Image (tube, grey):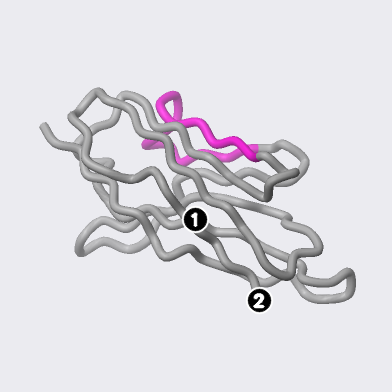
Amino acid sequence: QVQLVESGGGLVQAGGSLRLSCAASGSIFRINTMGWYRQAPGQQRELVATAISGGITNYADAVKGRFTISRDNAKNTVYLQMNSLKTEDTAVYYCNARVKTTWSSSTDNYWGQGTQVTVSS
């Protein structure tokens, strides 16, 4: 099994910054993609940013230029630096990892428990 533990959420004023962290642990052979998704009340979960093991990153249009995703592969950890936060960024942020637990296993999808980010006006 693989566990994802998130930290770094909280309450911040509009224009402020927060940094989220997510550490993966457990039976890990290789992590292909790590990323962040978010879900606002009454909304579907949506992609925020992903980082592939080779260094390629992808961002939702709504966060481009404000958020930066990064990985520390040695620590199986992914970060999300969020700057110039807006009230519409308020949501529960979920860490995601696509993990192979052995060399022959399929790649499975794992989720963290979520961390609340609230941006006040």
Residue drawn at 42 percent across, 49 percent down: 7
The magenta stretch spans which residues?
Answer: 57-71
Q: Is residue 15 above or below residue 76?
A: above
As drawn, 51 above or below 104: above
Which quadrant of the figure has residue 58? top right
Q: Residue furthest right?
A: 103
Mark 2 vs mark 1: which is more N-terminal?
2
Quadrant in which the N terminus is drawn:
bottom right
Q: Residue at x 49, y 44 (%)?
A: 21
Looking at the image, residue 39 sits to the left or right of residue 119; the answer is: right
Task: Determine the image quadrant of residue 53.
Answer: top right
Callout 2–callout 1 Cβ contact below 8 Å: no
Q: Is residue 121 left or right of residue 42?
A: left
Residue 33 pos. (x, y %): 67, 53
Residue that badge 2 annotates: 1
Mark 1 is surrounded, within 10 Å at the Cα level, by few (under 14), some (14 to 19) or many (20 or more) other residues, namely many
| Horizontal side, residue 18 vs residue 79: left or right | left
- Kind of residue at badge 1: Cys
Q: Looking at the picture, tell me which residue is in the foreground, 107 or 117.
A: 117
- Asked if the magenta segment contains residue 110, the reply would be no
Using a 10 Å C-alpha cutoff, classify the residue at mark 2 as few (fewer than 14 neighbours), some (14 to 19) or many (20 or more): few
Give, as a three-letter code, the residue at label 2.
Gln
The residue beneath circle 1 is 95
**Is the residue 54 above or below the residue 43 in the image?**
above
Of residues 66 and 80, the one drawn nearer to the viewer in this rendering: 80
